[in-house]
Image (cartoon, rainbow, N blue to C red):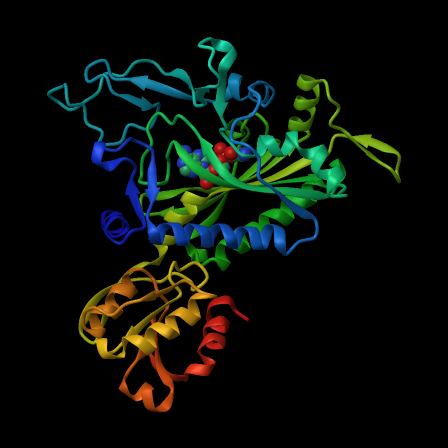
Amino acid sequence: MEKLVGLCLNRGFIYPSSEIYGGIAGFWDYGPLGTEMRNNVKAAWWQRMVRERDDVVGLDSSIIANPQTWVASGHVANFHDPMVDCRKCKRRFRAGQVDVDDRCTASDDGKHELTEPRQFNLMLKTRIGAADDSAGEAYLRAETCQSIFLDFKRVMQSGRMKPPFGIAQIGKAFRNEITPRNFIFRSREFEQMELEFFTPPANAMDWFERWREIRMRWHYDIGLTPAKLRWHAHAADELAHYAKAAFDVEFEFPFGWHELEGVHHRGDFDLRQHSEHSGKDQSYTDPEAKERYFPFVVETSVGVDRCMLALLSSAYCEDEVGGEKRVVLRLTPQIAPIKAAVLPLSKKLSEPAEKIAADLRRRFAIDFDVSGSIGKRYRRHDEVGTPFCVTYDFESEQDQKVTVRERDTTQQERIALSELPSYLSTRVLGY
Ligand code: GAP
């Protein structure tokens, strides 16, 4: 984990937010490579969940909604974590999560003297407008899905959809976590990719199982090893206040098995709650069966940041090439931030090599790298997961071919320049 965090910091994946002021716990910035990679994760999710389906449409709603939303959703009353304080060092912890390295600095034996757990609401508050009273109080959303429920009827009508159909959204969520920790695993600002799938009640369990299968397949396809993924079924006392049934996709992070994604059977909790609280009927009438009902909801909810951590930690590898140690990120070409690096063998060859890079840039994220020995440049790109290095050498001038080196096998082949875009397209995009 330490090595991975170092790499993320030094190579432009992830930095502490507002670092020059000492940072701020639970907030992170994504650097140039982290941003590219994040965009690839979100694009892979959107492609599978929205673009490849005719029963799912997208939404991009506001982060702040009418505060009544969070009363109706149950977050104001129920979205709590148990919190304890140390009477000696005054630090706060989530109950049951005081690690061995969380030693008390105010006691001789390092042991905390903890208070009884108290409930702590995780909603982050903000204030809107000029008035300095409670009328302006609002919340930063704690999950992206609530606006999907609020917009359910509008989307259904304008999109000419009817159950079973889904609404998908990618967006920021905020939680005032008591102890943000494990790098980007638990932060206070994070991004979710959520699908709410509305189905007739009788088919909900069927769809629940179908979505579980689709979601696990997606994790395999973006490059997570099946051996590091497993299901965890929620016992009755673990279920969130809205859930009838729930399964977590768990991943074996460097600090153990933890939730990566949640698949929830939410029943008709949300549409009913919002109907009651708003006074606007959110039920659906099936025109053929002449049947009125509140659609049941199957939800799939995964954090972009947790996906990033799972992908980075499972891709991180140290091996040897020609007797020399190297660090390599074995990311799939789809997820890798840079798809290919164009490397002129000598500075004298920069001009034609730059032209190749410019041409490829119209379709792919490309890096042009001219400094250092070719071996050093390969290592630099192995470390950030670039799947292909394209070397333009003196022979290229004559035969109009380049050497393409593969990151994982380090094998090299000569490819005609005219075939390079289609070669990369097949290897990176799969077509
Ligand atoms: N709408 C349902 C919902 O929000 P959740 O299990 O609380 O369910 C879903 O969150 C996913 O969001 C989690 O599986 C995780 O990937 C991500 N997530 C939740 N809290 C997070 C946090 N504090 N930091 C980073 N990711 C988080």
- The residue at the point 41 percent across, 43 percent down is 305
Left or right of 89: which side holds 216?
right
Q: 197 or 427, which lies in front? A: 427
Residue at 74% over, 40% down: 158
* Residue sitting at the far left: 108
User: Measuring 64% from the left and 31% from the top, which residue is drawn there?
Assistant: 149
**In the picture, which quadrant includes the C terminus?**
bottom right
User: Residue 255, image x and y in percent?
Assistant: 31, 43
**Looking at the image, can residue 282 be seen?**
yes
Observer-nearest residue: 402 or 252?
A: 402
Q: Position of residue 14 (x, y in %)?
A: 31, 46
Q: Which quarter of the figure has residue 316?
A: bottom left
Q: Is residue 346 visible to the viewer in this orientation of the structure?
A: no
Q: Most extreme residue toward the bottom, as rendered?
A: 398
Residue closest to the eye, 376 or 62:
62
The location of residue 53, given as percent across then percent down, is: 66, 54
Say whether residue 295 is left or right of residue 335: right
Residue found at the far front of this picture:
351
